[in-house]
Amino acid sequence: MDKMVEEIEKMRRSRGWDKTDTPAILAKSVVVEAAELLECFQFDEENFDPDAVKGELADVLMYAVSLCTDLGWDYRDVVIEKIGNVEQRYPEVR
């Protein structure tokens, strides 16, 4: 387990979230946080608050990594598998 996953899991355990989170709750949370990320760009795509974007992006990533962890998947393997899938489905643009 890498340092980031360890820190996320430590935070979840210390707050009891590891006991209450389910895959469905984590998936819903990814969507909620992604919507909050989108709100950062809602009124002005050029002038946004970088700190707000980082905070919301971190929330999305933490929920996604937690979902992978709870399902017994390494988040890196999930991404690499998807990249392979995309490479097969979509040709390179030259």
Image (cartoon, rainbow, N blue to C red):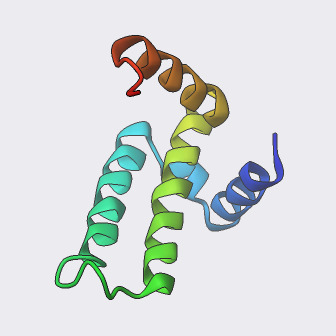
Which of the pair 69/48 is nearer the observer?
A: 48
Who is closer to the viewer here, 80 or 34? 80
| Total count of labels | 0
Does residue 71 appear to the left or right of 3 in the view shown? left
Hey, which quadrant is residue 24 in on the image? top left
- Name the residue rendered at 62%, 67% in the picture: 15
Q: Quadrant of the C terminus?
A: top left
Work out which residue is located at the far left of the displayed protein and give it.
43
Residue 58's spot in the image, x, y percent? 54, 65
Q: Is residue 94 above or below residue 50?
A: above
Question: Residue 85, how many percent across, how many down?
Answer: 44, 16
Task: Out of 88 and 77, give the one closest to the viewer.
Answer: 88
In the image, residue 32 sits, relative to residue 27, either above or below, namely below
Q: Is residue 6 left or right of residue 70?
A: right
Q: Taking 80 as reference, is 23 above or below it?
A: below
Q: Classify residue 17 as left or right of residue 35.
A: right
On the image, the x and y values in percent for residue 34 come to 33, 60
Q: Residue at x 50, y 46 (%)?
A: 64
Residue found 76% across the figure and 60% down from its top: 7
Q: Return the residue found at the far front.
A: 94
Q: Quadrant of the N terminus?
A: top right
Please say if 28 is above or below 37.
above
**What residue do we see at 68% from left, 64% from top?**
11
Residue 54: x and y in percent read 51, 74
